[in-house]
Amino acid sequence: MANIDVRAVNTIRTLAADVVQKSNSGHPGAPMGCAPIAHTVFHRFIRANPKNPKWLGRDRFVLSNGHACALQYILLHLCGYDVSINDLQTFRQIGSKLPGHPENFMTAGIEVSTGPLGQGICNAVGMAIAEAHMAATYNKDGFTVFDNYTFVLLGDGCLQEGVQAEAVSLAGHLKLGKLIALYDDNHITIDGETTFSFTEDVDKRFQAYGWHTLVVADGDNDLKAIEAAIIEAKNVTDKPTIIRIRTTIGYGSGKAGTAGVHGAPLGDSDIVNVKGKFGFDATQKFFVPPEVHEHYKIFGQRGQELESKWNALFEQYKAKYPELASELVRRVTNQLPANIKDLLPKYTTSDAPQATRKLSESVLNAVAPHLPELVGGSADLTHSNLTRWKTAKDFQPPSTKLGDYAGRYIRFGVREHGMAAICNGIHAYGGLIPFGATFLNFISYAVGASRLSQLSHHQILYILTHDSIGLGEDGPTHQPIETLATLRATPNGLTFRPADGNEVSGAYYAALINNKRPSFFALSRQNAPQLPNTSIENTLKGAYAIVDTPNPKLIIVGTGTETSLAFSAGEELTKAGIPTKVVSMPCMELFDEQPEQYKLSVFNDGVPALSVEALSTFGWDKYAHAHVGMTTFGLSGPYLEVYKKFGIIHEEVVKKGKQLVEFYKGKQAVSRLAKPF
C-alpha cells in the first residue's frame, strides 16, 4: 500500500491507543486491528457528506462490534464530521458526544446504537431491506434516487450471538446484494482464544445461508486485498457478501493477539512502544500528521460532489414525478398524511364485540393503503396476529415470484429477536415506519432489540396478540404474566392494552404521531364489547373515566378485556349503594405524562382504587390500593375457565370492591398519585 495509506492506518492505531488511555477506559485492541479495514472502507468506498450526515443518498456504515467505537469516532474526525480532537479527548466522559458505545442520538454520523453484540449486523440487514424497498418504490428510468450500500463491521462476538443468525438467514433468503459485512476475524474474545468456544466454519455457514463469501488473509497490512474484496462484493448483486478478514487484535501493541488488549488501556510504556514502532513521536498525544488530514479531504469532497449531483437529479425528479417526490419528502420529514386520523375506524356500544387483534386488523386495512411508509410483518404468525392487510404485497426477491422489493409485507419467519432488530435498522434508514408482530409472550425473545428501540428513539409498532391468560389452552408457556410489566418499566416506550375498537384506533394513532419512541400493542384473542365513552381522543390521555360517578366511594381501573369486568362490576356496586367510578387505562405511560391536576381528577384523592388486569399485578401499586390479577404463572384450559380459576371474574371484582371500601371506612385512602414533592 502507498506510504500515505500506511501513515493513515497507523495514525488511526496511535489515536485509538491515546483515546482509550486518556479515558482510562475502553477497547483499544479492535480499533488497532481493524484500522486497515476502516481506512479502506471510508477512504475508498463510503459515499457520505460529513456536512450533511443525514443526506438521504448516503451509504450506511454500522459498527456492530460497538465496543470498538474509538475506531469509528476517529474516522468521523478524519473524514470531517463534527468530531474534534478535543472531543476525542473526552471519550467516555459525562457530557461528551462520544459515549462508551455508539449512540445514534448523540453523535453525528452514527446510524444506530450498537454495543449489545449481534444487534448491529441485524440493523444493517434492516437498512439493506429498506434500501431495496425504497429503490423499488421510487427509482425510475434515468432517476436512481436510492442506490446506496450498507457496510457493517462485525467481530467474533457478533457472530456468536443468536440474534445475528436469525437476521443473516433472512438476508440470504432476501438476496440483499447491497449488504456487505466485514468480519474482523481476530480469533479473540474476552475469555481468550476463540478455540475455547467458537470453532465453526463461518464461511460455510454463510454460504448455506445464501451469502457470497470472500477471504482476506492479511488484514493487518494488505489494503489492496481488502479493496479488491469490496469491489468484488459490490459486483455480486444477487447475494449479500461477508468478507472474512484475518487481523491481529491490538496490532503493534506488546499484547497484540491476546485478550489482554481487548478491553483495557495499553498503558503508557506500551503506547511509547507502539508509537515508536509506527514512526510517531511518543511525546505527542492525539497527533494527526498534516498529510493524513490532507489525504482524508477526499472523503468530504467526494461526499459533497455526490450530494450536489443527487440534489440536482432530485430536482429533475420532482419536475417529472411531482406526486412521488412530494410523498417522499413528506415521509423522510416524518409528516403523516393529513387525513390519517379520519381513516381510523370508530365504534359505538351498539357495535358487536370483537377481539382487539381483529380490531387491529381493521385499522391496518383502513390505514395501510394510505400510509406507504408502513412496512412490516409477523414472526410466522400472520394468521394469528392478523397483520396482513387485504391489498398487501409481499417483500420478496423478484426471482422467487412470491412478491417483489416494492412489497411492504415482510415474512420474518420464526425470528422474533431478529425481527425487532431488523425493524430498528429499517426505521434508522429513514422514510419508513416498520412494524413487527408476534404473541405478547414472545416479545420476551426480542426484548434485547426492543429495548434498543426505546433507547434509540425508533418508531416501531410492535403488534402483540394473545395478550394474557385469555390465550387459554396453550397454557403457561404461552400465557404472558410479567411481560407488560417489563415493557412498562423500560423508558421511552408506549405500552397499550386497549379495551375496545376506539381504543385500538387510538393506540395506533398515538403510535403514529409519536415518532421518537416505539409502541407495544397488547391485543386479545377473545372478544371484547364496545364500551361507553371510549374514543381516540380519550386514549391519548392514557387513562380516563368511562363511568364518572359523582362523589364515588370506589374506583375500579381496568385494561384490555378486563375493562368490561370493571364496567359490569361498577354497575352492580353502584346499584348496591357503593357509587363506583370506572376507569379505562389503555396506556400507563401516556397517563403519567398528563398534568397532575388531570391525573388526580381520574384517581380522586380520598377514594380507594382497585385494578383489574389478567397479568401480573406488579406496577399497579402506583395507581391502585388493591388488585385483581396474576401473581403466578397461568395454566392450560378454556380461557373462561382459566379466568374463573384465578378469580378474574365479575363476582370476584365485586367482592374485592366491597372489601376495599369496607377496609377504608373511617380511614383516608390517599390517592396513589398524590406526591409529597
Image (cartoon, rainbow, N blue to C red):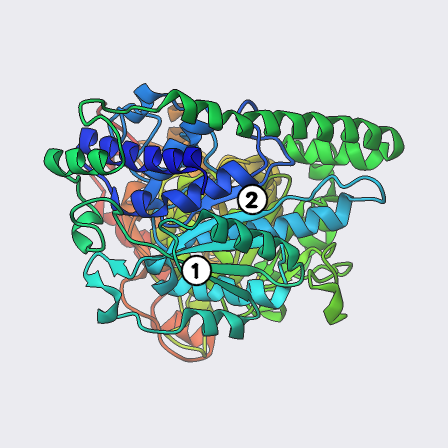
Q: Mark 1 and 2 residues: CB-CB less than 8 Å, in contact?
A: no
Q: Position of residue 599 (x, y in %)?
A: 40, 31
Residue indicated by mark 2? 427
Q: Please determine whether, in this image, residue 12 is positioned above or below residue 253.
A: above
Callout 2 crowding tier (Cα within 10 Å): few <14, some 14–19, many ≥20: many
* Residue drawn at the location 74% of the way across and 54% of the way down: 406
Q: Nearer the viewer, mark 1 or mark 2?
A: 2
Q: What mark, if any, has residue 569 been given in the picture?
A: none
Nearer the observer, 424 or 384: 424
Nearer the observer, 172 or 583: 172
Q: Quadrant of residue 642?
A: bottom left
Image check: 361 left or right of 659?
Answer: right
Residue, far left: 269
Q: Amino acid at mark 1?
A: Ile
The CA span between labels 1 and 2 is: 18 Å
* Residue drawn at the location 48% of the way across and 28% of the way down: 296
Nearer the observer, 249 or 67: 249
Query: Where is the N terminus found, in terms of image quarters?
Result: top left
Q: Position of residue 587 (x, y in %)?
A: 46, 43
Residue indicated by mark 1? 443
Indicate the secondary structure of the residue bearing disc 1.
helix
Q: Please determine whether, in this image, residue 502 is positioned above or below residue 295.
A: below
Callout 1 crowding tier (Cα within 10 Å): few <14, some 14–19, many ≥20: many
Say whether residue 465 is visible: no
First in sequence, mark 1 or 2: give its number. Answer: 2
Q: Position of residue 455 (x, y in %)?
A: 39, 40
* Residue drawn at the location 72% of the way across and 57% of the way down: 407
* Residue drawn at the location 24% of the way across and 44% of the way down: 252
Query: Where is the C terminus found, in terms of image quarters?
Result: top left
Indicate the secondary structure of the residue bearing disc 2.
helix
Say whether residue 555 is visible: yes
Image check: 63 left or right of 261?
Answer: right
